[in-house]
Image (cartoon, rainbow, N blue to C red):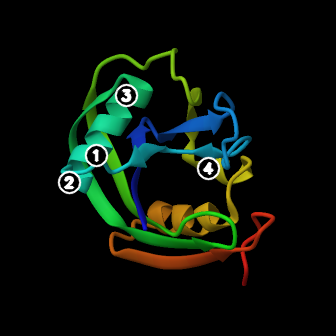
Amino acid sequence: MLLTTLCYVEKDGCYLMMLRNKKENDPSAGKWIGAGGKVEPGETRDECVVREVLEETGLRLNSVTYRGVVHFHSEIWESEEMFLYTSDDFEGELSDDCDEGDLRWVPIDEILDLSLWDGDRIFLKKLFDGEDSIELTFYYDKDGSLKL
């Protein structure tokens, strides 16, 4: 099982979003997501989210809020547990040199208009509603569609 983190950094009514468009063979190519990545051996999920956000965005998180876990299962990708975070407590300058995609501050009320994974729409709505004990399980078929 793959363990990952995902953080939505918030500022001035916007979330920092990344358009995945720079890595070859990226299953999320063309999708907008938050910042995050794989938990490394010996690393806690809190350490992972701070490291990944710094690596991808140049922003150093001073604190994070754990919002829940999303379980992903797929016919073609390894199963994944994704630990979901938000943060509005950070310092530093946003990097314009992310090697995974283009970063942009997106007003929260415009995020659902972006190209997103179907499951992301569901947990993002919960984040927008202020839920802090999210636990969801999603099943994707071989073409990347959410099975209902």
Are the residues at dot 3 and dot 1 in contact (C-beta closer than 8 Å)?
no
Q: Which residue is mark 3?
A: 55
Quadrant including the C terminus:
bottom right
Q: Position of residue 112 (x, y in %)?
A: 67, 54
Q: Which residue is mark 4?
A: 109
Q: Which residue is mark 2?
A: 44
SS for dot 4: helix
At label 3, the amino acid type is Glu
Q: At 75% from the left edge and 63% from the top edge, which residue is drawn?
A: 144
Which numbered disc, 4 or 1, marks the residue that appears first in the sequence? 1
From the image, which quarter does the N terminus lie in? Answer: bottom left
Residue 48 tag number: 1
Q: Earlier in the sequence, mark 2 or mark 4?
A: 2
Kindly identify the amino acid type of the residue bearing the numbered disc 2: Thr
Q: Is residue 71 above or below residue 12?
A: below
Q: Is residue 40 among what the camera can see?
A: yes
Q: Secondary structure at mark 2?
A: loop
Q: Nearer the viewer, residue 125 or 22?
A: 22
Residue 83: x and y in percent read: 37, 61
Marks 4/3: CA distance?
27 Å
- The 10 Å Cα crowd at callout 2, few under 14, some 14 to 19, many 20 or more, is few
Q: Is residue 34 left or right of residue 101?
A: left
Q: Is residue 8 visible?
A: no
